[in-house]
Amino acid sequence: MTSAVMAEVDESGAHAIKRSERGAEAFARARRHSRLVRVLKFVLPGAAIVITALFLGYSLLSSAGWGGVDLGLTSIENGELVMRNPSLDGYTRENLPYSMTAERARQAVGDENGAIRLEGIQASLPLDETDRATLTARSGVFDRQKDRLTLSEGITMTTTSGIVARLQSAEVDIGANVLSSDEPVQIEMEGMRLRADTFRASDGGNKLIFENRVRMELDPATIRQNREEESGNDE
Amino acid sequence: QEGQAGATRLNLSSDEPIQIESDRFEVDESKNIGVFIGNVSVVQGATLLKTARMTVHYAKSNGSATTGSAQIERLEAEGGVYLKSEGQVATGDRGTFDMKTEVLVLTGDEVVLTEGKNVIVGCALTVQMKTGHATLESCKSGESPGRVRMLLTPESQN
């Protein structure tokens, strides 16, 4: 039997590393998750800003020229001004339509600066010329003093490009344009799922930070099949 | 298949799902990067990659009419790289994978490729993903300049 041998292999020692024919695909798989960048950059912060517009629209009753503010049926119930189905629609800077409704908005009477409580929020927001996002949140509180919006009891956002984001709650610091959540977040798009225990979007959505047990799953087959459909051959 | 003793099989691909885990994942749109930070592990079937930090570089998205995603140009792993695939282990300090050329390069003061008892040490392991062809380059400096050190032991002569 040969003894242990220290063999010198010349500089270009080569070793055949076999791979099945889809060898490089393994690393190409993550390509789709980059689309996450586009969505979270626009939609989550965008949603927050539009939701805020709904409330500003509500409290700036008198100002004209604020998109279509329909305050729905307003009534006073046990010391609270209650608006049913308030809605707001308007156009973004890129002249793309957005709309927002809530089943109910409530604010203590005589306390214009008091927090506005909302139930059943539904928003439709433009992502770009072709894609839109729909956002729903079961409830939210808009604190105008602190310029903060808190959405809770489950937020779901779906886009026409097939992205679904689920948050349990979200805090929006409107002044600092920071949106964050210290509860688990899940984002899915064709062939990719990203989960983390906390999430923060800052710098106008340019920076997205997922933390604590970040897990991303990529499904090669779905990703490749979608890529072939969409791009033919964009490589 | 040249008659290299102890040919290594680094089987990297299949349709199996890939799991990437880390402590933190940061996406910075302005720099077009996504960075997995802290205990980064990438698992696909029997292949496992571990590193401290993995940066995904996206090409500038051309903002085409469709929501064409920014294409991934290159992955970079830093802070030590451990790559295991069915009996082979490769370790180094840094690793890069270029999506276009499909070339994986593992570099470091000591890049070690191990299969069973076979240990090969050099300074750069380059793997052509398309062909699976790998080249382990020697270290210019260090105690055995110009030579790749390779240790063969009897049982491995299968």
Image (cartoon, coloured by chain):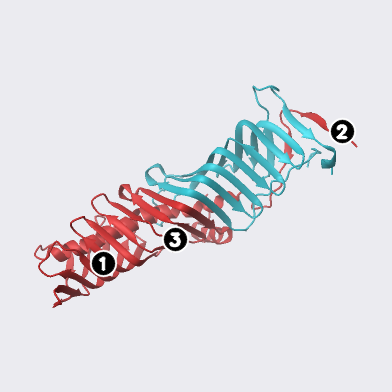
Chain seen in cyan: B
| CA–CA distance in space, label 1 to label 2 | 78 Å
Secondary structure type for disc 3:
strand
Q: Earlier in the sequence, mark 1 or mark 2?
A: 2
- Label 2, secondary structure: give it: loop
User: A230 or A7: nearer the eye?
Assistant: A7
Quadrant assignment, res B68:
bottom left
Res. A99 mark: 1
Could you say where residue A14 lies in the image, as x and y percent from the top left? Answer: 73, 36
Identify the colour of chain A in the image.
red
The disc numbered 2 marks a residue on which chain? Answer: A
Residue B69 in view here: no
Say yes or no: labels 3 and 2 on the same chain: yes
In the picture, the disc for residue A186 is: 3
Q: Which residue position holds label 2?
A: A3
A31 or A148: nearer the eye? A148
- Mark 3 is on which residue type? Gln
Q: Amino acid at mark 1?
A: Ser
